[in-house]
Amino acid sequence: MYHSETKIRVRYGETDQMGFLYYGHYALYYEVGRAEAIRQLGFSYKELEAMGIHMPVIELQAKYLRPALYDDLITVRTTLRELPTGPKIQFHSELFNEAGALLNKGLTTLVFYDPEAKVKVPMHEELRKRLEGFFK
């Protein structure tokens, strides 16, 4: 299993009238978590795209347990529970407040996609090599 954590402070412009993180912004927090998880493996999304691999989202699930509030420092925990064997990859996201309370859980499914050939492809071999050690 591979996981990473990153922190995001809830900004005023991301909140609704009640001071809660607006529900639509959780997907953006998941994206920050995914991008940082990949960066911690030594890649950026930009580098993956330069290698000819795009990763469009094909499914998103979210479960809201407690609100994130304006100015809260949120920990986004992003986990890969299994090493992909095909073109799909699933990122599990959990958001915690500073007290450690679980606020939200999400699951984002992406595919590895070759934009020139317009087909799904397996995970790039270099990314697979960097992840394999976490799944032994």
Image (cartoon, rainbow, N blue to C red):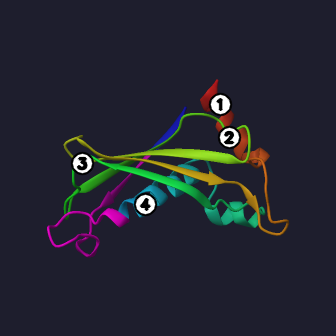
Residue that numbered label 1 is attached to: 133
| Residue 72 coordinates in the image, percent (x, y) | 21, 57
Residue at figure coordinates x 60%, y 57% from the top left: 58
Structural distance between the alpha carbons of marks 1 and 3: 30 Å
* Left or right, 95 with reference to 39: left
Residue at figure coordinates x 70%, y 46% from the top left: 127
Residue that numbered label 3 is attached to: 97
Structural distance between the alpha carbons of marks 3 and 2: 30 Å
Three-letter residue code for mark 4: Ala
Structural distance between the alpha carbons of marks 1 and 2: 7 Å
In the rendered image, the vertical position of residue 91 relative to residue 18, given as above or below:
above
Which disc number belongs to residue 130?
2
Label located before the other in sequence (1 or 4):
4
Structural distance between the alpha carbons of marks 4 and 3: 17 Å
Residue that numbered label 4 is attached to: 27
Label located before the other in sequence (3 or 2):
3
